Image: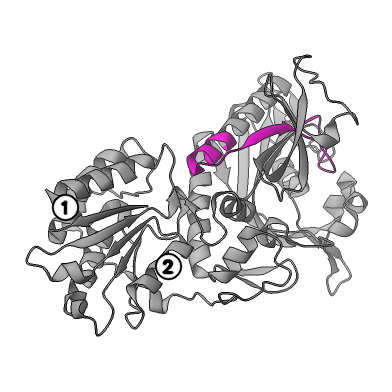
Amino acid sequence: MEVFMHHCHHKLPSLLSRTLFKASKKSYIYCTIHTSPSVSAVSKPVIPPALVSRLFLPSNLREGQEGGDLTCRSQRLMLQTGLIHPSNPGCFYYLPVALRSMEKLVRLIDEEMWAIGGQKVDMPALCSAELWKKSGRWELMGKEMFRLLDRHNAEYCLGPTHEEAVTELFASQTMISYKKLPLLLYQVTRKFRDEQKPKFGLLRGREFYMKDMYSFDINEEAALHTYHSVCQAYGRIFDRLGLKWVQVQAATGNIGGTLSHEFQLPADIGEDQLLVCGNCGFSANIETIDPGQTECSMCQTGTLTESKGIEVGHTFYLGTKYSETFKALFVKASNVPAVAEMGCFGLGVTRILAASIEVMSSEDAIHWPGLIAPYQVCVLPPKKGSKAHEVTSMADELAQSLGNSLPNLRGEVVLDDRMQMTIGKRLKDAKILGYPYVVVIGQKALEDLPLFEYVGEFCHFNSHTNGIRTCLSDQLVAVMR
């Protein structure tokens, strides 16, 4: 934790604005700029800072209260801070602060999917049994699938995955040219799986958010190129989040295909058993390795050591498993129809959210990946009735200025207006929730040269966000002088 004392708070927005604008050229910072011929004449609406007293953050676990069946750190912290609220077994309400973080994560995923040519769609959650019977997976999925009948006794399921649906969509377009391939269609939507024993909060639920992408290519070589391109994009997502991850050889399971990899976050509570070679870096899910094997089959010299991981992504090269069944054809350059080669690629959105909290946080405080922290700055005014209470307006002004003058902090500032509480108590709450930056307006703001306290950081920063932190700290030091 770093603590700085600063003055000239009225200069801060303009100074930080210039610095952060320069940093944004080198860092992944979310700043959407809409241009038009008359942009200079258009003023953006003023966004008031969010007030902590108004945030819907129900406290599900009081300090010192036992958590019952809480089996992991992320589940306990997310319930304790009011990020989620339990509904049915394996189902949760995603409350406003958590939803802000998840939406930022989805935007990050969108960026990487668009960068490799992904196009976003939205497919029905209610899927016809006929599609699943046609692929042979209606019975294969077994009790894990939520099934239902409509009033006409037609069978449906709540989609656990969408290979059948997307392949039927592609097949319905009878004259797709090879020039349109590769075609990468993806969605971010709710999925449903009837887990027998939901546990670990968002890490293993019955209803969850997933990003699933499906690719269509002209031949196997092109499909494998797409496959590796998506795998690289997944790696960039985890790198940008500052997560330690490993890509492991995996089984294809009931999805099918001939090639599969999982993206795992090493964690003691992970349900997957992994084997990693200390010599060449080869890694695999233990279910793909012969029982008792300890020698690496890749380098022949390394020893496989066992560890645990949380699966947050899974990729499959499907070949023509689904495209042949559904007659998903495209027209070749020779004007002859051919069966498309396919791949499918999943990312557990809510699982990444919970897993990042699980592996980065301490037992008593959330540490977010910097890019998806729900709010970036929390401003703490003095306690009501204290000697410093008369400078409360300074805190209001600072919060308003930061949230509207700096492009990268627009809408990212929260004001803890619970002034009946001590600064110490509110600072503790800020630490638990993991605001990256906290600015405290206290006793020293009454001095002739007003001083305020900047506290950082209750957050995880990586190479893509360190520039913001460094520039912010350097600029505040410059203001001191």
Front in this rendered view, residue 388 or 33: 388
Q: Residue at x 47, y 52 (%)?
A: 372
Residue type (three-letter) at the residue carrying disc 2: Lys
Residue 128 as seen in the image, left or right of residue 180: right
Residue 78 in the image: state x and y as whole percent.
58, 65
Mark with earlier residue (1, 2): 1
Residue 146 as seen in the image, left or right of residue 423: right
Vertically, is 29 above or below 129? above
Residue 314 in the magenta stretch? The answer is no
Q: Residue at x 49, y 35 (%)?
A: 115
Question: Could you tell me which secondary element the residue under label 1 belongs to?
Answer: helix
Residue 14: image tag: 1
Marks 1/2 in contact by CB < 8 Å: the verdict is: no
Please provide the residue range marked out in magenta. Answer: 234-260
Q: Residue furthest right?
A: 139
Front in this rendered view, residue 222 or 284: 284
Distance in Å between CA atoms under marks 1 and 2: 29 Å
Vertically, is 27 above or below 378? above
Question: Can you see residue 251?
Answer: no
Question: Can you see residue 167?
Answer: yes
Residue 479 in the image: state x and y as whole percent.
15, 50
Looking at the rendering, which quadrant does residue 44 occupy?
bottom left
Residue 347 in the image: state x and y as whole percent.
64, 46
Residue 428: image tag: 2
Residue 49 in the image: state x and y as whole percent.
31, 69
Looking at the rendering, which quadrant does residue 213 occupy?
top right
Vertically, is 241 above or below 158? above
Question: Could you tell me which secondary element the residue under label 2 belongs to?
Answer: helix
Q: Residue at x 89, y 70 (%)?
A: 153
Front in this rendered view, residue 363 or 356: 363
Residue count near mark 2 (Cα–Cα under 10 Å), binned few <14, some 14–19, many ≥20:
few
Looking at the rendering, which quadrant does residue 87 occupy?
bottom right
